[in-house]
Each structure stands twice: as C-alpha cells, then as structure tokens.
Amino acid sequence: MQSKDKPSSDSGTLSDTEKTNEVISSQMVTAESVQPERVPMVPSGMQQTLSELQPQISTYSVATTRSIMQPLPLVAQPSESERGLGERLSIWWEGIRPAYLALSLLPVVLGSVTAWTQSISLKTPRGNFHATRFVIAVVVVLLVKVDALVVFADYYCLGGIDTSNSLGPGGLIQQGLIKPARVLALGLIALGLGALLGAFVAVSGGWLVFVFGLIGVLAAYFYSGISKGLSSLALGELVFFFIFGPLLTIGSYMVQTGHLDRIVYIYSISLGLLATAFIHLNNMRDTESDAPAGKLTLASLLGLRLSRLLYVILAVGAYAPIVALDLPRHAPHLLLIVLWTLPTLVIAITTVLRTTSPASLHKAMLENLRLETFFTILLIVALVVTAVLPVLPHLPSIALPF
C-alpha cells in the first residue's frame, strides 16, 4: 500500500527529461523578467572611445542621375585646414598623376633629340641643341597636360561622369580631397601659363608651331572641359594619337630647328599609336562606369572582343613605321633595337586577351606605358649612336686644329 505523501512514479515523479527542461527554462531570461539594473551597460568612457575609433563613412546612391552636381565621397575627408603642408603637396602630386607624365615627355624628348642628332657632323661634332627652348617646351607640355588630363578630367565628374572611385590615380574631386573651385582655378592657371610660355617658345619654331600650340590648347580644353567633351564622343583615341604623337614630336623638333622633316613624322606615328593604345585600355577599363554616365567611347561601341583586337592592332602597328624605315639597304639598321621591347609587348597583349576585370586592365595600362617608355628610350639611343659613330674617328683632328 502506497503512502499518500509519496507521489507515485507514474503521476508525481519527474522524469530525467522533465528535470532537464526545467533547468533550461529556469536559465532563460525573458523580456518581462529582466530588471533595468540587471542589463549590462557599456561604460560611457569606453563607448566614447569606440565611437572615436569608428571611421567616418558616409554612403550615397550609385544610381545615375543628371541632377547630381557633385558626388559625395565614400569616405569623409578632413577639411583642408586640418592638413599640413606636406599632406597638401602629396595630395596635389598624386592628383597630377606623375606615373602618366611619360606620355607627355617622351614625344618632346624624341623630337628634340632627333633635331640634335641631325645637326651632328664633322663641322659641328657636338651638334646644335637649344637647351632653353627644350626646357620651356617641357614646362609648357606639363602645364597643358595637368590642365587637360587631370584638372578638367576631375572637374568633369561634376557633370555626372567619372563619379566612382576609379583604379587610376587622381580623383581630387571624386575623393573629396580638394574643393572643385580650387581644382578649376588650377586648371585655368595651368592653361594660361602654358599658352603664354608656348607663344614665347613658338617664336623660334615659326608660324606652324603657333598653329600646333593653338590646336594643342584647344584640344586640351575640349577633351573634357565641356559637358560633352571629345572624350565622351568616341574621339578620345583620335585626340591622343594626334597630341601625343605628331603634334608634340613635330612641334618640339621645329622648336629646335625651325623647319619640318619627314623622318620625325615617321617616328611620331609610332609614339602616337602607343599612346592611343594606352588610352584605349583606359576606356576598356572604365567601360562599366562610363556607359551609365552617357560617356561614349570606342571601347563601349566595339565591345570586348573588338576592343581587344583594336588594341593588338595599335600596339603591334607601332613597330611598323620603324621596321619599314629600316628595310632599305642603306637604312640606319640600328633603329631595329626597338624590337628588344617585344617581350614587354607580348606581356601587355596576353594580359589584355586573357582578362576582363578592370584591375587587370589597369595593370595592362601600366605595362603599355612601360612598353612606350622602353621603346622611346631605345629609339633615342639608336639615333644618338647612329649620329655619333661617324664622327668619333675624326674627334682628335677636330679638337686639335694644327
């Protein structure tokens, strides 16, 4: 007979499962049972420290709209007054894209060296080289380059183009580093100084240099300084070929000599094609961001396959003028040392043919710039050696008149 105060195993005794559930439920905290004083709180000092460590990040819509005048940067930048002099200079230096200065300098150096080597003879073994004209020409080209390819390219983003953070350097306005008014002011100052110095140095080259200079200044402004610049009308490649090929090379040659020669035009074609290949890669890289903003380029018109083919034609075609010039029997065959750059050409072409990502295309741009630099340096070395070698045996008799 069971005792009344001892529960039976069927009805009153708790099983192991029920005991486990009871322990778990006793450890659970519900919203009704939590008292305010039992909620763990972060100390105010620690909370303030955490807030200070958080980056100042702001977001904005990436939808394309013509009503956007100035896109907000992804990361809020400190005000210009909070930056030191060194930081300001570093920002401006990065903004002028120093890695791309070779595009402007190489044709000027090639044209000037070509003029100098042609003046080397037994009567003038040192040749005729006007260093002052050369320095002024370099300064003019750099000023116009800063205006056209950096300042107005950045200022153009206010029209709704290039509003995203690109892989390339620069982007003073896009990143919120410099106020648009100051960027525009720098562009106008650079354009004005370049025009004045260009007019001064053009006196030595003749009226044709004036024409070249005027065309260069106008092309620099209309490239991207207006709402529908030449770069947005699928004319960027044509402008680059003309400016960074014949215009700069022939113009610098005429500044030294005062006349025009057919040979320098042949050299300028090679540099123009390599510069065109460079800007074409730039347009291929930025196709996804250019199309929604209404920027029309050859890369967006042709598509990926034809754009790759066009790049191969431009890069390989740069060698054609030099090779054709050296085919005759008595041609200066030393110019063929530019073929030493073929491995770099292969690397650039294979990179373009195998990739579709903007980051890889940006690397191909740098490889193309490296190719143009080596190509021009080897061409200059060949010109100098070809001109100096015939004079070397006569240097002792030239130096001693008796």
Image (cartoon, rainbow, N blue to C red):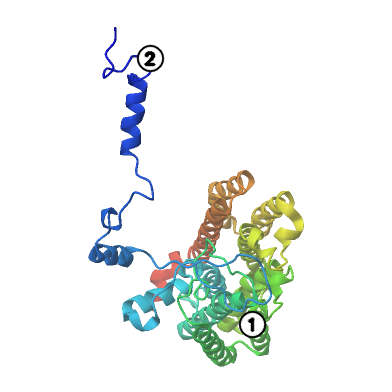
Marker disc for residue 259: none
Q: Quadrant of residue 267?
A: bottom right
**Point 56% across, 87% down: residue:** 191
Q: Position of residue 40 (x, y in %)?
A: 27, 54
Which amino acid type corresponds to the residue marked 1 in the rendered image? Tyr
Q: Is residue 3 above or below residue 240?
A: above
Q: Are marks 1 and 2 in contact (CB under 8 Å)?
A: no
In-front residue for pair 278/152: 152
State the residue lying farthest toward the right.
301
Q: Position of residue 184 (x, y in %)?
A: 54, 85
Q: Is residue 166 something that shows in the picture?
A: yes
Mark 2: few/some/many CA within 10 Å (<14, 14-19, 20+): few
Callout 1 secondary element: helix
Q: Position of residue 300 (x, y in %)?
A: 72, 59
Quadrant where the C terminus is found in the figure = bottom left
How much space separates mark 1 and mark 2, taking CA atoms?
A: 96 Å
User: What residue would you read off at disc 2?
Assistant: 10
**Point 67% across, 84% down: residue:** 218
Q: Position of residue 227 (x, y in %)?
A: 69, 79
User: What residue would you read off at disc 1?
Assistant: 221
Callout 2 secondary element: loop
Question: Depth-wise, is mark 1 or mark 2 nearer the camera?
Answer: 2
**Point 34% across, 40% down: residue:** 28
Which amino acid type corresponds to the residue marked 2 in the rendered image? Asp
**Point 55% across, 77% down: residue:** 145
Q: Earlier in the sequence, mark 1 or mark 2?
A: 2
In-front residue for pair 97/85: 85
Q: Quadrant of residue 266?
A: bottom right
In-front residue for pair 279/24: 24
Q: Is residue 30 left or right of residue 294?
A: left
In-front residue for pair 322/28: 28
Q: Is residue 204 above or below residue 24?
A: below
